[in-house]
Image (spheres, rainbow, N blue to C red):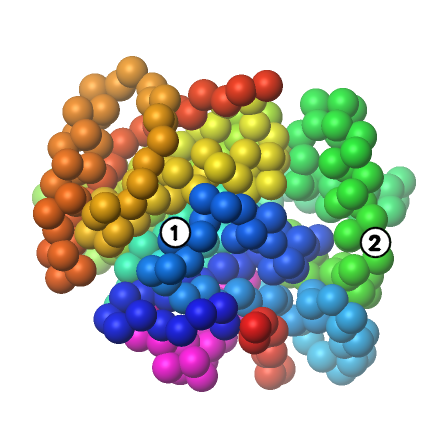
Amino acid sequence: MMGVPKGNRPTILTFHDIGLNHKSCFESLFNHKDMHEIMQHFAVCHVDAPGQQEGASTLSTEYTYPSMDQLSETLPMVLQHFSLKSVIGMAVGAGANILTRFALKHPDMVEGLVLINLSAHAEGFLERAAQKITSWTHALPDTVISHLFGKEEIQNNHELISTFRHLITNNINQSNLQQFVKSYKSRRNLEIERPVQGGNLNARMLQCPALLIVGDNSPVVDAVVRITILMNPTTTTFLKMADCGGLPQVDQPGKLIEAFKYFIQGMGYMPSASMTRLARSRTASNSSMERNRNRSGTNTDEQRGRSHTDVSMESTPGQTKLGCENV
């Protein structure tokens, strides 16, 4: 945990992607100067998947690595352990998939979700075949790099790729990582249904507001666009970050934090948060977002508003154990 839970406010709970842990995935974001204001209002709980924390021992050969569903079912125990009533989830890739499952199963525990690089579908036959061929010809770090970053980044941003290749190779137990990767690649569909007026009242959908984020050069940009079609349009914001690669929280942390502040304000928190200029796409829903931002200035923690729009940001060139970082 970072900080102390603030009254009846939710705690920010993070979950990382494959090849990363909470430090390599979120450290640069939460150390960014623009995040300090948010940290004054919310405590943070970072969660590491089993065996992915730095210095982790190799998991026993008798240990069966949990599925995405099983990992999501450990999170209520995390909340109980730290006496947390509810959370705002922030997660990337595999972590986003896990937190979405958690929110679908336990809507009373999740007030909002910030989902970066969410892929809601299981891997298809062609994807599995391509992955199998790749595993024959590429080392595990190369496979993870291709998952995290787009081709343009891999070809042009050698310093960034070298840094993360080093982190993946030296900071993560490779045997444990292989099991986490396998678990993610074996995921089931989330089976989210878009609500239809007069349709199925028991449709499987998120009950909380969600902010979906992806860089326009991300390898999963098409997958994220597909999932937005299935989300509830009245509670979902889609943010496609311009000139941004596979890890927006690393590539453009300041712009992501600004979007996060707007999202939090839409939930009725931090009404007086300082803002810089955010460039938005020219869509019919812009006026809706403006109304929600204005309304959030008078909301209290008990009077929650919500902002929902599609946004584009401009840039300038067995027993499952999850690790919870205590600071």
Q: Quadrant of residue 153?
A: top right
Residue depicted at 52% across the width and 39% down the height: 253
Q: Secondary structure at mark 2?
A: helix
Q: Which residue is mark 2?
A: 169
Looking at the picture, how far across and down is residue 271, in whole percent? 21, 47
In the picture shown, does residue 42 fall above or below 78?
above
Q: Assess whether residue 146 is covered by the magenta stretch.
A: no
Q: Is residue 104 visible?
A: no
Provide the major secondary structure of the magenta segment: helix
Horizontally, residue 72 falls left or right of residue 201, namely right
Q: Quadrant of residue 95?
A: bottom right
Looking at the picture, how far across and down is residue 312, in whole percent? 40, 24
Other-residue count near label 2 (Cα within 10 Å), few / some / many at <14 / 14–19 / ≥20: some
Q: Which residue is mark 1?
A: 37
User: Observer-nearest residue: 32 or 158?
Assistant: 32
In the picture shown, does residue 63 fall above or below 132?
below
Name the N-terminal-most of marks 1 and 2: 1
Other-residue count near label 1 (Cα within 10 Å), few / some / many at <14 / 14–19 / ≥20: few
Residue depicted at 32% across the width and 29% down the height: 310
Looking at the picture, how far across and down is residue 105, in whole percent? 35, 66
Q: Nearer the viewer, mark 1 or mark 2?
A: 1
Q: Quadrant of residue 9?
A: bottom left
